[in-house]
């Protein structure tokens, strides 16, 4: 009886491993469409058909020439001190996609703000005038809602059709009020560690999960 | 009547094996293909961790409301959504996830339809996800062999060790 049990145990172990192999071979099925290759190197973001989360990610240290106030109508040097990152976006897939942006301050620098746009939005070639033209009011809250959406899960996006290539821009700057004390003490803000992400989703509401 | 540990272990092992073989055999014979659900777009009908089994279906037999599995353009990835429209002339279907706010953006050609949902098994998909988690097939071969060895050891050696220990305790 004992040897029968031993032989059967070995056979059953072998059979169970085959069964595990069957379950391992089962493919997965998902909600949306899938990556057919994402190349995100340097300053270009090329993606194919989408999964929910298709990311472009770029980390860099940005040095600003000075702080500024986007809401101050008397601040005339705004466009001079902002930093603008350009990212070439190419939809090589077969379905239209939305591109959202996210900018994170990964260092200790204070007062980092950002604005997502393309050249077709520019008013008189000025980023500040462009911001003023799209925000209902020049406040931090309005800027935040433009960037992230009212529920923090949306925000400004661009639709990129299959085969289309666009240059999207992200302006970043330092709000003076947040670094006022350091500046008054004579310290100039050092480089800011900034992480810029672009997120591609299907061209429908609710596809983005930040 | 005293129930022996090794008998219980052996019987559990045997029942699991028989059930697994019967389940897999049933699906192979019936031509059902399984897909592990990894996202909640068909929530309530299909939840994450389910395995959905589909069977071949002709385009003419499809109806609005059917849940179908469709291959993506690379034919290696799949999504499973409900049919919300059928274009008989163009031989395409429009699909939508029950939990999604909109139809899928592109109509799907009939030739990409893998099958119509037949039934689903809750939670079993986690087994697939765990087995596939970030490991190459070569490594999994080793893991499978290790699983087999562990199963054999547990079933043969463990009862002997326990028996020996019991004897030792009674000798003392």
Image (tube, rainbow, N blue to C red):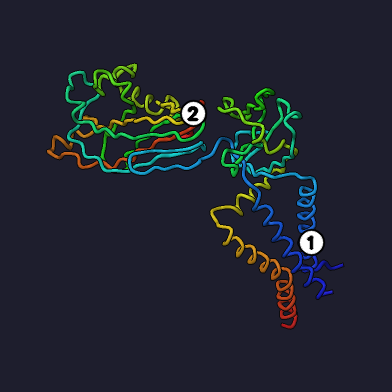
Q: Which mark is residue B14?
A: 1
**In the rendered image of this protein, does residue A203 appear above or below residue A195?**
above
Residue at point 77%, 60% (across, down): B12
Image spot of residue B115 (x, y percent): 71, 37
Residue at point 34%, 35% (across, down): A87
Have a look at marks 2 and 1 and say if they share a chain: no
The subunit letter for the residue under badge 1 reads B
Image spot of residue B157 (x, y percent): 71, 73
Point out the image quarter for the N terminus of chain A. bottom right
Kind of element beneath mark 1: helix
**In the rendered image of this protein, does residue B157 appear above or below residue B115?**
below
Decide which of A69, B29 is in the foreground and name it: B29
Image spot of residue A161 (x, y percent): 46, 27
Bin the neighbour count of mark 2 within 10 Å (Cα to Cα): few under 14, some 14-19, many 20 and up. Answer: many
Residue B88's image quarter? top right
Kind of element beneath mark 2: loop
Classify residue A117 as left or right of residue A77: right
Q: Residue furthest right?
A: B1
Residue at point 42%, 29% (across, down): A164
Residue A124's image quarter? top left
**In the rendered image of this protein, does residue A5 appear above or below residue A61?**
below
Q: Which mark is residue B23?
A: none
Which of discs 2 and 1 lies nearer the camera? The answer is 2
Q: Which mark is residue A96?
A: 2
Residue A72's image quarter? top left
| Circles 2 and 1: CB atoms closer than 8 Å | no
Q: Residue furthest front?
A: B89
Bin the neighbour count of mark 1 within 10 Å (Cα to Cα): few under 14, some 14-19, many 20 and up. Answer: some
The subunit letter for the residue under badge 2 reads A
């Amino acid at each position: 009886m004992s040897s029968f049990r031993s032989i059967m145990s070995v056979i059953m172990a072998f059979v169970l491993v085959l069964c595990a192999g069957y379950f391992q071979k089962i493919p997965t099925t998902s909600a949306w469409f899938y990556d057919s290759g994402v190349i995100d190197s340097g300053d270009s973001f090329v993606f194919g058909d989408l999964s929910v989360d298709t990311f472009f990610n770029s980390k860099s240290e940005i040095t600003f020439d000075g702080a500024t106030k986007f809401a101050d109508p008397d601040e005339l040097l705004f466009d001079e001190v902002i930093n603008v990152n350009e990212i070439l976006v190419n939809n090589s897939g077969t379905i239209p996609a939305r591109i959202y942006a996210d900018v994170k301050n990964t260092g200790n620098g204070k007062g980092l703000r950002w604005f997502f746009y393309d050249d077709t939005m520019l008013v008189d070639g000025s980023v500040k005038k462009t911001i003023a033209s799209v925000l209902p009011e020049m406040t931090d809250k309005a800027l935040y809602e433009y960037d992230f959406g009212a529920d923090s899960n949306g925000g400004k996006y661009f639709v990129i059709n299959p085969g289309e290539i666009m240059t999207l821009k992200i302006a970043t700057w330092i709000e003076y009020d947040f670094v006022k004390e350091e500046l008054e003490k004579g310290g100039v803000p050092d480089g800011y560690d900034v992480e810029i992400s672009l997120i591609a989703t299907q061209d429908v509401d609710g596809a983005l999960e930040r | 009547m005293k129930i022996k540990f090794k008998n219980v272990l052996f019987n559990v092992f045997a029942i699991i094996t028989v059930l697994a073989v019967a389940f897999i055999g049933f699906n192979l014979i019936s031509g059902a293909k399984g897909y592990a659900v990894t996202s909640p777009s068909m929530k309530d009908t299909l939840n994450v961790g389910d395995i959905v089994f589909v069977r071949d279906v002709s385009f003419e037999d499809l109806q609005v409301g059917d849940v179908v599995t469709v291959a993506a353009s690379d034919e290696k990835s799949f999504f499973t959504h409900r049919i919300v429209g059928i274009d008989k002339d163009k031989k395409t279907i429009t699909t939508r996830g029950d939990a999604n706010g909109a139809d899928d953006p592109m109509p799907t050609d009939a030739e990409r339809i893998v099958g119509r949902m037949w039934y689903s098994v809750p939670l079993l998909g986690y087994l697939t996800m765990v087995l596939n988690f970030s490991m190459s097939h070569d490594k999994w071969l080793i893991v499978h062999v290790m699983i087999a060895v562990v199963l054999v050891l547990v079933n043969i050696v463990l009862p002997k060790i326990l028996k020996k220990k019991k004897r030792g305790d009674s000798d003392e």
